[in-house]
Amino acid sequence: MAIAIVMAASMVPVSLLVNSIVPHPYMDEIFHIPQAQEYCQGNFRKWDPMITTFPGLYFVSLAYTGVFLLGAKILGLSSSLLDLCTPAFLRSINVVLSLLCYLLFVGIMRYLEPDKSLKRVFAKATLLAFYPLHWFFAFLYYTDVGSTTAVMAMHLACLQQAHWISALLGAVAILFRQTNVIWVIFVTCTGLLEFLQGPIRVKPRETEELKADASSDKSLFGFSMENKRGSQDMKLRRRVQSSVLADENLEMFPCNSPVVHDAPGIGSEIWSLAKQAWLRRWEIFKSFGPLICIIILFFLFVCYNGSIVVGAKDAHKVSPHFAQLLYFGLISAAAMAPVHFQPSNFGIPIQEFLRPQFWVLGGIGSGAAFVFVHYFSLAHPYLLADNRHYTFYLWKDVIQRNQSAKYCLIPLYVYSWWSILHSLGRTQGRLWILVFCLGIMGVLVPAPLLEFRYFTIPFFLIALHTKIPEEIELGTSFCMTILYLVLNAFTMYLFLFHPFHWANDPGGIQRFMW
């Protein structure tokens, strides 16, 4: 809590500065803020047809405003919800949610890596809190921070086997952004994997440690895990998986990675789990029924609505944008550059270089990347027409600089994905990684617009489930935090102090942002 207070103290001055220089709604806020103000007046039937998401942000804003209304009345600052629903006050919701998200990062890491010291946990959580896409939108009234917070809370609840709470939080996540149904499916599938897979190997020391502290194990939400079915097995598996992988001393090469080792056996593994699931179907339905119901209800809505979005359907049609996967891989690897681009990663021994698996996997990856780049590099009209975003310049000056530029990036795309999958393979099984990759595809491929904000949740999941070697962890977190702070300061400086005008709209003020 002390660190959360320090984080809050660092964000309040930035929030005040943003609201003093940009007091009026900007960009997507011109849709969100008036809609929230309609809700503050009780006009729940009025809806802006340009808004594509469910009203989750507005419901949370209504509750948030109501909490402060009584105090505002006592102090004579406001007499109604509408008086309190100013742009500055509505933006403050995301500051609060970003702090809650920070605590959720801590909770997830303490669950996934119970032996990690608090110093290392808070260092990594602080790094993620300053991730530029997440940090910047904490000061504007966008759905991103609330969406991320809801997904992280859902993920943590499912890890702790609180499936009913996880389902409730999953519904909240979908109310913030419809594509979060993919992450509801993801946590359901990974929860099923944990439910069905038994312990790998138990060391006596780890068993005794678990017995010693099981009675005092509490979740971040405050409910006891002492009597939860299977919680001890899950905790043992986390510790055992870590020790097994450490003992095996896996090399940093794709041939030895758990992701691809004994790949032909993945089909039989799926079949075995399917049989177990059928035999334990009533137990599964009892535990995961709420999450499954949320997923079914959402797809019924899509069938009824004819689209995943509720407004501006023509501008958000589903497209086979497979190149998004390549952009995501490169951006995510670059966001954790000291982990994925350290010199030791590039030293492939001769014996690995000569193995057929190396060439087969490399050829498949390179071939897929070429197909994605050549046939599925889509340019949305918004991307081509809006020079207020990094993606406009990335597309114009890098990807489309000349006819061969986009192909020159293929080696970086392939390497980035290799490094990500290998890092995840050190802590997660093949099926977990398969489900996660399918989730990324479900979120990114249908989206025709290249938008870095769509990368935030899968990046956080990668970062949280990647175990950084202890010898470089603190240094990596420190270096990346400094880099994030510099990038944040640069972007915020441009946003606040370098407005510009469009020739076709000389009276309007434009600002550069993510």
Image: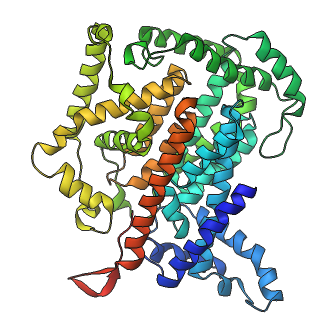
Q: Is residue 231 left or right of residue 368?
A: right
Which one is nearer the viewer's eye here, 383 or 247?
A: 247
For residue 202, say whether it is visible.
Answer: yes
For residue 182, say whether it is visible.
Answer: no
Q: Residue at x 60, y 67 (%)?
A: 11
From this view, report whether residue 17 is shown above or below residue 412. Answer: below
From this view, report whether residue 85 is shown above or below residue 52. Answer: below
Q: Residue at x 71, y 29 (%)?
A: 115
Q: Residue at x 47, y 12 (%)?
A: 267
Q: Position of residue 235 (x, y in %)?
A: 74, 25
From this view, report whether residue 249 is shown above or below residue 307. Answer: above
Q: Image quadrant for the C terminus?
A: bottom left
Quadrant of the image occupied by residue 404:
top left
Quadrant of the image occupied by residue 507:
bottom left
Q: Is residue 223 left or right of residue 105?
A: right
Q: Residue farthest to the bottom?
A: 76
Q: Residue at x 24, y 32 (%)?
A: 411
Q: Position of residue 335 (x, y in %)?
A: 42, 45
Q: Position of residue 362 (x, y in %)?
A: 27, 21
Q: Position of residue 324 (x, y in %)?
A: 33, 44
